[in-house]
Amino acid sequence: MVSFGRRGFVSGLVAGGVGSSFLLERAFAAQKDPRNLDKNPKFIASPFTLGVASGDPEPDGFVIWTRLAPTPLDEAGGMPLKPMYVVWEVAEDEKLTRVVARGQELAHPELAHSVHVEVAGLKADRPYWYRFRVGGYESPIGRGQTLPAPGAQIDRVRFAAAGCQHYEEGYYTAWRAIAQEPVDFVFHYGDYIYEGKDSGPGIKQMNGRPFKVLRRHVGPECYSLDEYRRRYAQYKTDEDLQAAHAATSWFVSFDDHEVDNNWAGDTDQDGTPPDVFLFRRAVAMQAYYEHMPLRRRSLPNGSHMQMYRSARYGNLLNVFVLDTRQYRSDQAYGDKDVAQGKDVWSPQRTMMGKQQEQWLFNGLAQSDTRWNLLAHQVMMLNLAQRHSAQSELTYSMDQWSGYLYSRKRLLDFVQQHCPGNVVNITGDAHRHFAGDLLVNGDDKKPVSVEFLATSITSGSDGVGDNDHFSQSVRQENPWLKATTDKRGYVLCDIDRDHWRGDLKIIDKVMEQNGTLSTYASFVTERGNPGLQRA
């Protein structure tokens, strides 16, 4: 998707090799400056305190992002409330000596002085480096990567999946590790921020376990646009998170905490009238867009934001990024962990909504790549647990186990149209899970597999794999291959016939420089779905 506004036109000229000074001058003269333009901005410190990022890559380019905020936790990030130009450039080398695209983009106060440049005209399947300039300051240098051409022969793709990064509950050591992985992209499944208030200096409970808050939130629970903006700014000041953003291009998706815990469609967890809750959802989505490397097609329209989308890695992999929050029905049975009643099978209840489901089915039916990735937010494994030896089996109503009609429709479609080449990558559960996906619990053969990436920090250090929950779910769910309550990420390595997932863990996140290791590795073979130990 190429923008043909003034600066989009300039980027195409320069990237295409026809960017003479004469053409540049004419392009820049094609549109008048805003009347309130700050032509000579001054800052008390570098305005690039929140780092840089790239995302939503395509074969000829990607989005590059930054937000100007010299004092990020202050009102308006310490910025004057006027638009100003930010100069950007993209080069073929990490020292930026071979610049192939440059231009300038307006940073508007209406969008918190964020900048989203849709760079186009680049070569396919290669890295580029970029930076921004304004007011005499330079940003850090970031690295983006274009996609291969749609029909290109691709033999290997590697990516990391991660999310759930509660600022109060640990250091972002896993993001530093991801920044050092040689991956083609990162998928962030959601919970980039947590909307809750400052937990205070005392002891906090997580899954019945006490721990002391490590880094406190600034401010109350987020309801206003300013509060959401400040929360993103606080999270983005973390150097490890900035390093991961600067390392490669990301595909991002929100889950619940970017708005409110376990929200569903137009419903929150507090019983707020839907027409009132949508005001909160609207400002939360604006703040999300302002802080993510997203294309203009994802610019919010009121309380709606277009987030489901696809990408293609040559003839090896189709990526389908799903949205399982905006269109879903409210959770059944008060969103409690309960036995599965008839409501979870109701055709009137949906996880993706009709339009998104049809988009996905059409994409899968037409896919001619070796593999298909469904990148979404919450667990698809229909996971049962017992809270005690005598209690009944219960299931989460916030995951696909609370939407069994939608789950069966999707898995039936996979079985009929693309058996053996669909892998699900999910998150939200604050634990690693790896398992086989069966249409029905008594089926003999899986139709797909799932890797659920644990949290970056949410849940603090965790307790490993010998707690009551781990024992219960392993006993009750024979299709579950592994689970552990530790922090980390999933690293996927895909070739033409095999998909390997490594469950990476950090031993401690409540201390700096925790140790990275691999908890378990599994492989699924194309055409023969099912996880095997690597």
Image (spheres, rainbow, N blue to C red):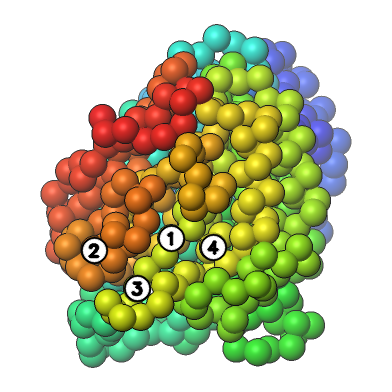
Label located before the other in sequence (3 or 4) = 3
Label annotation for residue 471: 2
How crowded is the residue under tag 2: few (<14 C-alpha within 10 Å), some, or many (20+)? Answer: some
The reply to whether callout 3 and callout 4 are in contact (CB within 8 Å) is no
> Nearest the camera: 390 or 145?
390
From the viewer's perspective, is residue 496 above or below residue 480? above
Find disc 4 in the rendering and name its residue.
401
Q: CA distance from mark 3 to mark 1?
A: 10 Å
The amino acid marked with disc number 1 is Leu
Q: CA distance from mark 4 to mark 1?
A: 7 Å
> Nearest the camera: 505 or 188?
505
The reply to whether callout 3 and callout 2 are in contact (CB within 8 Å) is no
Quadrant where the N terminus lies? top right
Label located before the other in sequence (2 or 4) = 4
How crowded is the residue under tag 3: few (<14 C-alpha within 10 Å), some, or many (20+)? Answer: some
Q: CA distance from mark 3 to mark 2?
A: 10 Å
Q: CA distance from mark 3 to mark 4?
A: 15 Å
Q: Position of residue 522 (x, y in %)?
A: 31, 35
Q: Is residue 43 visible?
A: no
Find disc 1 in the rendering and name its residue.
383
Is 7 displayed left or right of 500 in the figure? right
Find disc 3 in the rendering and name its residue.
386
* Residue name at image x 62 percent, y 35 percent: 415
* Residue name at image x 79 percent, y 83 percent: 275
The amino acid marked with disc number 4 is Ser
Kindly state the secondary structure of the residue where label 1 is placed: loop
The amino acid marked with disc number 3 is Arg
Q: Position of residue 424 (x, y in %)?
A: 50, 42
